[in-house]
Amino acid sequence: MQRCQLHKRSNVKDHLPEHCRAEYDRWLRNAYALADYGEAKAALQKLWRQLCEVNPSAARSLEEGMEETLTLHRLGVAPLLRRSLSSTNLIESCLSTVRHVTRNVKRWQGGLI
């Protein structure tokens, strides 16, 4: 079972004060970006310990289902494919990819705009 990393990050951030959300989101994103399962799990556990001191409800949110957010890591899925599958919502994942690609287009050939 793979749980959505994007939703996990959002759920954890929702428990945090506005002024520290970006910093903790960056740490979560970096942990999930690690290629090795053990390293990613260790980074998330370290973050969980920090959150236990700062905001116990955010720590509980991170802890709940943490292992399932690392399923793709545990299976050794290649980073590019893992990036696409990190969100279990296929439509959301497709739209995210389209947004990423289209923001890089500088000039549309033959388009209406």
Image: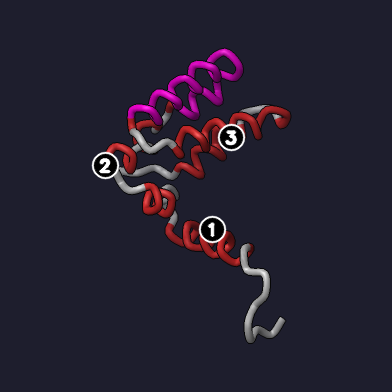
Q: Which of disc 3 and disc 2 is earlier in sequence?
A: 3
On the image, the x and y values in percent for residue 76 come to 28, 42
The residue where tag 3 is placed is 25
Q: Which of disc 1 and disc 2 is earlier in sequence?
A: 2
The residue under the point 50% across, 43% down is: 7
Kind of residue indicated by mark 2:
Leu
Residue at the far top in the pictured view:
53
Identify the secondary structure beneath mark 1: helix
**Location of the N terminus (image quadrant):** top left
**Location of the C terminus (image quadrant):** bottom right
**Does residue 51 show up magenta in the picture?**
yes
Q: Which of disc 1 and disc 3 is earlier in sequence?
A: 3
Kind of residue indicated by mark 3:
Asp
Tell me whether circle 3 and circle 1 mark residues in contact (CB < 8 Å). Answer: no
The residue under the point 62% across, 63% down is: 104
Of residues 4 and 83, the one nearer the viewer is 83
**Does residue 79 show up magenta in the picture?**
no
The residue under the point 38% across, 38% down is: 35
Above or below residue 41? Residue 96 is below
Question: Quick one: label 3, few (<14), some, or many (20+) residues within 10 Å?
Answer: some
Identify the secondary structure beneath mark 3: helix
On the image, the x and y values in percent for residue 38 come to 33, 28
The residue where tag 1 is placed is 96
The disc label shown at residue 75, or none? 2
The dominant secondary structure in magenta is: helix
In the image, which residues are magenta? 38-62
Kind of residue indicated by mark 1:
Ser
The residue under the point 46% across, 42% down is: 5
